[in-house]
């Protein structure tokens, strides 16, 4: 997979979270493991702060292959109110070179 395309794909997800556009995220999510309500509950349950997008680029994340698949998994530490948090987004990207962004599925948003 292309690392620049992976980063752009992750940035799109984080921007939508920051905008609280959970309906759009659900619509784009290939496997729909999390509902819009799940996303809102996870973010609202973390001291009620707002997800913020670091500029420039994304601060802390790891990409790693999912064994036996053509997927790449990501753990991304969300910023809340412009500060590091214990809240982590976990998602997977599917290898598809036809689109501008990789298709994805959100697996969880949780505090570590």
Image (cartoon, rainbow, N blue to C red):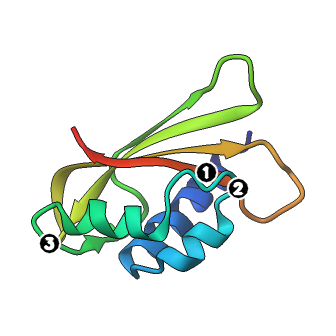
Tell me whether the residue at label 2 lies in contact with that at label 1, contact meaning CB atoms closer than 8 angstroms. yes
Rendering quarter of residue 92: top right
The residue pinned by badge 3 equals: 48
| Residue 55 located left or right of residue 26 | left
Residue 53: image tag: none
Which element carries disc 1, helix, strand or loop?
strand
> Cα distance, mark 2 to mark 1?
5 Å
The residue pinned by badge 2 equals: 30
Residue at 40%, 69% (x, y): give it. 37
> Cα distance, mark 3 to mark 1?
24 Å
Residue at 29%, 72% (x, y): give it. 52
Q: Earlier in the sequence, mark 3 or mark 1?
A: 3
Which element carries disc 3, helix, strand or loop?
loop
Other-residue count near label 2 (Cα within 10 Å), few / some / many at <14 / 14–19 / ≥20: some
Q: Quadrant of the N terminus?
A: top right
Q: Earlier in the sequence, mark 2 or mark 1?
A: 2
The residue pinned by badge 1 equals: 105
> Cα distance, mark 2 to mark 3?
28 Å
Q: In the rendered view, tell whether residue 23 sits above or below residue 29.
A: below
Q: Earlier in the sequence, mark 2 or mark 3?
A: 2
């Amino acid at each position: 997979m292309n690392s620049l395309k992976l980063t752009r794909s992750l940035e799109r997800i984080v921007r939508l979270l920051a905008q609280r556009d959970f309906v759009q995220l659900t619509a784009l999510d290939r496997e729909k493991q999390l509902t819009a309500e799940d996303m809102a509950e996870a973010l609202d349950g973390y001291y009620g702060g707002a997800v913020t997008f670091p500029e420039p680029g994304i601060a802390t994340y790891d990409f790693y292959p999912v064994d036996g698949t053509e997927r790449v998994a990501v753990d991304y530490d969300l910023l809340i109110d412009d500060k590091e948090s214990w809240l982590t987004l976990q998602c997977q990207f599917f290898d598809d070179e036809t689109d501008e962004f990789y298709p994805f599925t959100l697996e969880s948003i949780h505090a570590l």
